[in-house]
Amino acid sequence: MKILTEYRIIKRQCPLWEESTNNVRYFDYFTSRLAESSFLPDFIKKIIRYIDYCPLIIALKLFKKRKQYNVVITGDLQAGIFYAFLNRLFNRLFNQPVYPHLFLDLMLDAERQTILWRLKHWFHRQVFSSVACMLVFSSY
């Protein structure tokens, strides 16, 4: 089983998790060397580090590598929504298969009767229809 994720889990907790999981959030060798280099100004280093945490960049990395893995797990709400949107969009436009996606979320919104909430709810229903499994941890 090969798992692709952006979810930060300490790998040393489980050897099986460590050997079967790759995390797109961690720098690749080139970007980590650039972020630590002494010849670049500090603001450039901050931009390089930010790229590793930008939800859209994370979703694009997940989307690019999804075919090489059995499942994609997202724990970041924004990155998960962007990834699910890309998965759904490419499925609809180019008839590509929807790859298994496990979405972890911390809380569902309480229902409201506003137009903005209804629009958000409709969008989430469309996007999350491509998600294979959604785990929600909520207090209500």
Image (tube, grey):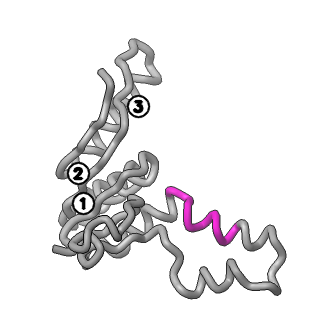
- Dot 3, how many residues are within 10 Å of its Cα: few (below 14), some (14-19), or many (20+)? few
- Dot 2, how many residues are within 10 Å of its Cα: few (below 14), some (14-19), or many (20+)? many
Residue 40 image-quadrant placement: bottom right
Contact between labelled residues 1 and 3, with CB atoms less than 8 Å apart: no
Disc number placed over residue 120 in the picture, else none = 3
Type of amino acid under label 3: Lys
Disc number placed over residue 130 in the picture, else none = 2
- Quarter holding the C terminus is top left
User: Residue 103 at what x, y percent from top left?
Assistant: 29, 49
Type of amino acid under label 1: Asn
* Disc 2 to disc 1, C-alpha distance: 9 Å
* Residue of label 1: 91
Q: Which residue occupies 50% across, 58% down?
A: 56
User: Residue 59 at what x, y percent from top left?
Assistant: 43, 61
Type of amino acid under label 2: Ser
Residue 22 image-quadrant placement: bottom left
Q: Is residue 122 above or below residue 38?
A: above
Contact between labelled residues 2 and 3, with CB atoms less than 8 Å apart: no
Q: Which residue occupies 31% across, 69% down?
A: 4
* Disc 3 to disc 2, C-alpha distance: 16 Å
Q: Is residue 30 left or right of residue 5?
A: right
Is 73 part of what is drawn in magenta?
Answer: no
Q: Nearer the viewer, residue 40 or 84?
A: 40
- As drawn, the residue found furthest toward the top would be 113
* Disc 3 to disc 1, C-alpha distance: 21 Å
Disc number placed over residue 132 in the picture, else none = none
Magenta-drawn segment: 47-55
Contact between labelled residues 1 and 2, with CB atoms less than 8 Å apart: yes
